[in-house]
Image (cartoon, helix red, strand yellow):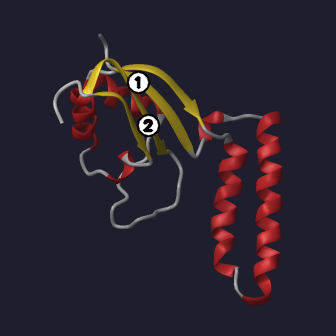
């Protein structure tokens, strides 16, 4: 595609699977029109997945560094959960191995209850320093 072809680029759960994420962000910058937006998500805390193509986890500081290096302006970085939801997701993943035969409904009920409670507790005691993922909005300068 030619330079400046896109108004918006969406990269959802992509960056952590790339060996050279800085090159992908440079390419997104090239493809975006001036004042175009890059919207991306990537995990900070998540189990290994799509192995062996699972390379990185990203903090807000890591996002800012990579995006600054690629020539973007960071508009916003938003945590998608707090510590309670993150922990509940990890507990749920750990329990999946027991989701067999007669234990399946027990595990389903337990994980559902843990996640339901965690989502509500995140509203009371939101601790974003341990978010499982972040939403990032960046802009190519004019």
Point out the residue furthest to the bottom here.
101
Question: Where residue 85 appears, x then y in whole percent?
Answer: 70, 48
Total label count? 2
Q: Quadrant of residue 64?
A: top left
- State the residue at coordinates (21%, 39%): 23
Q: Which part of the image, by quadrant, shows the C terminus? A: top left
Distance Cα–Cα, label 1 vs label 2: 8 Å
Q: State yes or no: discs 1 and 2 in contact (Cβ < 8 Å).
A: yes
Marked residue nearer the N-terminal end (1 or 2): 2
Where is 80 relative to 14, above or below?
above
From the image, tell me which residue sits under label 2: 40
Point out the residue furthest to the top here.
142
Q: Which part of the image, by quadrant, shows the N terminus? A: top left
Q: Residues within 10 Å of mark 2 (few under 14, many from 20)?
A: some
Question: Where residue 44 appears, x then y in whole percent?
Answer: 50, 45
Could you say whether the residue bearing mark 1 is in a helix, strand or loop? strand
Q: Nearer the viewer, residue 78 or 142?
A: 142
Is 128 displayed left or right of 134 in the figure? right
Is 52 displayed left or right of 122 in the figure? left
Q: Quadrant of residue 5?
A: top left
Q: Which mark is residue 138?
A: 1
Where is 48 relative to 140, above or below?
below
Question: Where residue 98 appears, x then y in whole percent?
Answer: 69, 80
Q: Quadrant of residue 120?
A: top right
Is 89 displayed left or right of 62 in the figure? right
């Amino acid at each position: 595609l030619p330079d400046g072809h896109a108004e918006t680029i969406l990269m959802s759960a992509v960056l952590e699977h790339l060996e050279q994420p800085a090159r992908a962000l440079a390419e997104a910058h090239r493809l975006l029109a001036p004042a175009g937006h890059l919207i991306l998500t990537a995990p900070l805390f998540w189990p290994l997945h799509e192995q062996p193509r699972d390379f990185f986890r990203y903090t807000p500081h890591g996002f800012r560094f990579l995006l600054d290096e690629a020539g973007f302006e960071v508009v916003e970085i938003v945590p998608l959960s707090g510590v309670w939801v993150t922990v509940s997701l990890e507990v749920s993943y750990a329990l999946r191995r027991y989701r067999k035969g007669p234990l399946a409904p027990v595990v389903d009920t337990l994980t559902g209850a843990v996640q339901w409670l965690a989502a509500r507790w995140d509203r009371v005691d939101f601790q974003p320093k341990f978010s499982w993922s972040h939403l990032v909005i960046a802009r190519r300068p004019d």
